[in-house]
């Protein structure tokens, strides 16, 4: 990764985070915390990794992305808008009556969304089905899915992991956003999923452990995922919930709460300063 590529990704991630804040503030509802922790991942996927075409969202040979932790739709929408799937100003209609951008992704209304999600634990199963179908159809497309660390407390997740290994889905990449917090608090206190990498390896996955805010580590993990054959691949990324907005960072209370007007101004000021700093690099 060149210095200029990294700079462009960092700037794009700032814009994605700003989109999250704009959308949830306008909606007076939503889930900013987990959207912000995954913002760098969303950015890398849509700016570099995924083989997709915003002008033809339903292109048959595209890569697929399933947001299994569907409540973090504000982050996905911000990345999709940045990539050109729909106008960025539409982010301000998040959760409004009549808007196509509702609180969870809807594949029937949102360009670029490959699966309707929101009921935790189910998205990864859909991704497994997509990966198996792609192989049976002889397609080279890959399937990516993002889960929360609280989400992997769901039993269906591990049924899907067994399925992925049994069918040797090496065109599947499972990503886990390990920000350590869920709606009820620390994941280790609610129902500990640890040790996550060891569990995935026991289920037959090749695993990469990375800093989910480091683009070079993200790139290396995806490169390794594409090179891995015969077994599914998982990326466990350590992140900070609320990343980029000081008063939201590592605060479980920001799992599903929108910023008020004052908080919006503070958040946007911080993110604008971060963007200016990146652009001046």
Image (cartoon, helix red, strand yellow):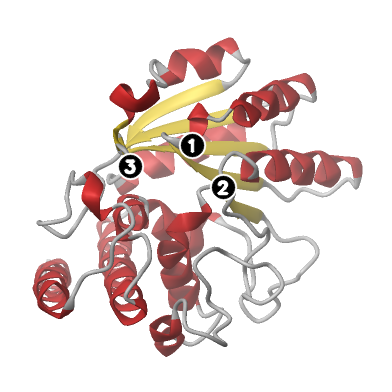
Label 1 SS: helix
Depth order, front residue of 71/243 = 71
Q: Could you tell me which residue is drawn at 42 percent across and 35 percent down?
A: 150
Asked if disc 1 and disc 2 are in contact, CB closer than 8 Å, the reply is yes
In the rendered image, which residue does mark 2 sit on? 68
Label 1 sits on residue: 151
* Badge 1 density bin: few <14, some 14–19, many ≥20, Cα 10 Å: many
Left or right for 179, reference 235? left
Point out the image quarter for the C terminus. bottom left
Instruction: Please tell me how crowded label 2 is: few (under 14), some (14-19), or many (20+) other residues with Cα within 10 Å.
Output: many
Q: Image point 77% across, 46% down: which residue?
A: 130
- Image vertical order of residue 105 relative to residue 27, above or below: above
The residue beneath circle 3 is 212
Q: Nearer the viewer, mark 1 or mark 2?
A: 1
Query: What is the distance, in whole Å, between disc 3 and disc 2 at their CAs?
Result: 17 Å
At mark 2, the secondary structure is loop
Q: Pick whichever, 9 or 152, lies toward us.
A: 152
Above or below, comparing residue 92 to residue 7 in the picture:
below
Q: Secondary structure at mark 3?
A: loop
What label does residue 46 carry, if any?
Answer: none
Assess whether mark 3 and mark 1 are in contact (beta carbons under 8 angstroms).
Answer: no
Q: How many marks?
A: 3
Relative to the observer, which residue lies in front, 88 or 219?
Answer: 88
> Between 241 and 171, which is closer to the camera in this rendering?
241
Residue 158: give x, y in percent of width and height. 62, 24
Residue at x 44% of width, y 78% of height: 94
Please name which of the two marks, 1 or 3, marks the residue nearer to the observer: 1
Task: Say if 236 sits above or below 43 in the image.
Answer: above
């Amino acid at each position: 990764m060149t210095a200029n590529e990294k700079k462009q990704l960092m700037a794009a991630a700032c814009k994605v985070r700003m989109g999250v804040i704009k959308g949830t503030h306008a909606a007076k509802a939503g889930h900013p915390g987990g959207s912000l922790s995954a913002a760098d991942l969303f950015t890398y996927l849509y700016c570099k990794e995924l083989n997709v075409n915003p002008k033809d969202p339903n292109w048959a040979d595209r890569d697929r992305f399933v947001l299994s932790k569907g409540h973090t739709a504000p982050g996905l929408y911000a990345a999709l808008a940045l990539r050109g799937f729909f106008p960025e100003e539409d982010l301000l209609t998040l959760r409004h009556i009549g808007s196509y951008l509702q609180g969870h992704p809807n594949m029937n209304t949102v360009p670029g969304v490959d699966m309707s999600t929101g009921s935790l634990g189910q998205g990864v199963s859909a991704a497994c089905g997509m990966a198996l179908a792609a192989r049976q159809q002889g397609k080279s497309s890959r399937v990516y899915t993002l889960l929360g660390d609280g989400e992997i407390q769901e039993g269906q997740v591990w049924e899907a992991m067994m399925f992925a290994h049994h069918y040797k889905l090496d065109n599947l990449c499972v990503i886990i956003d390990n920000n350590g917090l869920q709606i009820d608090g620390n994941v280790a206190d609610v129902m500990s999923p640890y040790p996550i990498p060891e569990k995935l390896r026991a289920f037959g996955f090749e695993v990469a452990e990375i800093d989910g805010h480091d683009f070079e580590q993200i790139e290396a993990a995806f490169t390794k995922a594409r090179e891995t054959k015969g077994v599914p691949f998982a990326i466990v990324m350590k992140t900070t919930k609320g990343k980029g907005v000081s008063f939201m960072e590592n605060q479980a209370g920001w799992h599903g709460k929108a910023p008020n007007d004052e908080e919006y101004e503070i958040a946007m000021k911080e993110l604008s300063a971060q963007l200016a700093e990146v652009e001046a690099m």
